Amino acid sequence: MDKLIITGGTQLSGELRISGAKNAALPIMAATLLCEQPVSIGNIPHLHDITTTMQLLGQMGIQLTIDEKMNIEVVSSTITKYEAPYDLVKTMRASILVLGPLLARFGEAHVSLPGGCAIGTRPVDIHLDSLIKMGADIRVEAGYIHAKTRRLQGCRLVLDKVTVTGTENLLMAATLAEGTTIIENAAKEPEVSDLAHFLNEMGAKISGIDTDILTIEGVEKLAAKDIHYDILPDRIETGTYLVAAAITRGKVKLKDTRPDILDAVLDKLKEAGADITTGKDWIQLDMHGKQPKAVNIRTAPYPAFPTDMQAQFTAMNSVAEGVGIITETVFENRFMHVQEMQRMGADIQLESNTAICKGSEGLTGAPVMATDLRASASLVLAGLVATGDTLVDRIYHIDRGYDHIEEKLAQLGATIRRIPK
């Protein structure tokens, strides 16, 4: 099992290009199941989850071609199976996103239940209940969702809670449903909007994009020709490298990103003392060598502060000036990185869903273990400012969501290397 070793103490400086967003790429790759014509997707990040999704589509009989620029062409006319097996779904919960497209286009889907994950349970009840309202016959047996329909029917869906994957699954399913579907209390994350724009490019009729009410007029088929669509930049990767600069009191410029979808994160970095300037597709952060100030954070669905940036700001607060209070409202078990940071000397107290971080001048390097994707990133950030060496184990988590993180941090001056298994 690969590990990362980081020697702390370097002030990060330089420029980086941000990769495409994993959380947009995965649903968009699933959405290619809906289209009868070949589809090309660009700005795909080089990640383990992308490889897993390609395996999933490939085992269904779909043809995939990838070029040296990470453009993927998908031909779904060759599909022979309508199943997402357990051995793939267990490694990547986003596999559930094939359920809606398979059911909508082929009238049949057999998808393994994803279960929970390290950061808490994320049930698919909303997905299933809504598809049943659209006319699907659904049975759950032996850990699999078995779904059938002659054709899904448009209807009004009021989601019990804001769910990103739920919104995406139902959005895809509704594109080929008969009649009009209205999804209320829909997730407004930029990745959901990116999916909606992609579907419209293929011939879907979706309105209300960027709002919590999506209206979808069902069409007979999606068969637009010569489709090429570039994935939007990864806002969480962007935020992670901005925090890396802030925590090391450095200066970085991130290119090929979008400041307009990072308002909540940029506001908190400014509150921490960062000097931030932006352009249409770039962000520059300069700490002018100063220690960051502790900030209070409460996670919530977009456009509020993202849960996927909570762990990184916990790391920053651990070496910031003052006391910062971080409240997690999205997932019930997302502070597992705290115990590992405490091994490095962080003064953090947990009270239910709140972390109280008392900043210090520094941490001490130690062996630590990643428990999930964003937790692993936060431990790397802590290692950047720790005295001595930090060894981060179980980094297969980080490879699911960060495109060559050690190479990008080294490009900014960090002393970091991968130790192969």
Image (spheres, rainbow, N blue to C red):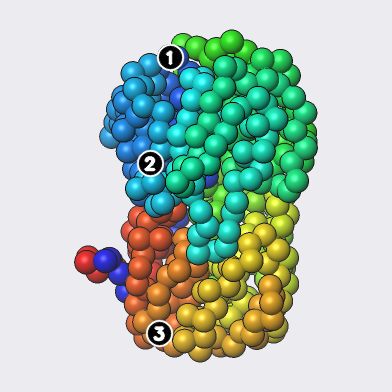
Between 156 and 346, the residue placed more toward the observer is 156
**Percent x, y of residue 420:** 22, 65
Q: Which mark is residue 37?
A: 1
Q: Looking at the picture, does residue 256 appear above or below residue 109? A: below
Type of amino acid under label 2: Pro
- Type of amino acid at the residue the image marks with label 1: Gln
Q: Are marks 3 and 2 in contact (CB under 8 Å)?
A: no
Mark count: 3
Which residue does the numbered mark 2 point to in the structure image?
Answer: 85
Q: Nearer the viewer, mark 3 or mark 2?
A: 2
Residue 25 appears in the picture as rendered = no
Label 3, label 2: how far apart the Cα atoms are:
41 Å
Residue ID at (51%, 74%): 337
* Tag 1 and tag 2, C-beta contact below 8 Å: no
Residue tagged 3:
365
Image coordinates of residue 1 in percent, x first then y, are 26, 66
The answer to which quarter of the image holds residue 84 is top left
Which corner quadrant of the image does residue 76 belong to?
top left
Q: As shown in the figure, which amino acid type bears the numbered disc 3?
A: Gly
- N-terminal of the pair, mark 3 or mark 1, is 1
CB atoms of marks 3 and 1 within 8 Å: no
Q: Residue at image x 52%, y 85%?
A: 342
Q: State the separation of the CA atoms marked 3 and 1.
A: 53 Å
- Name the residue located 47 percent from the left edge and 86 percent from the top edge: 344
Q: Secondary structure at mark 2?
A: loop
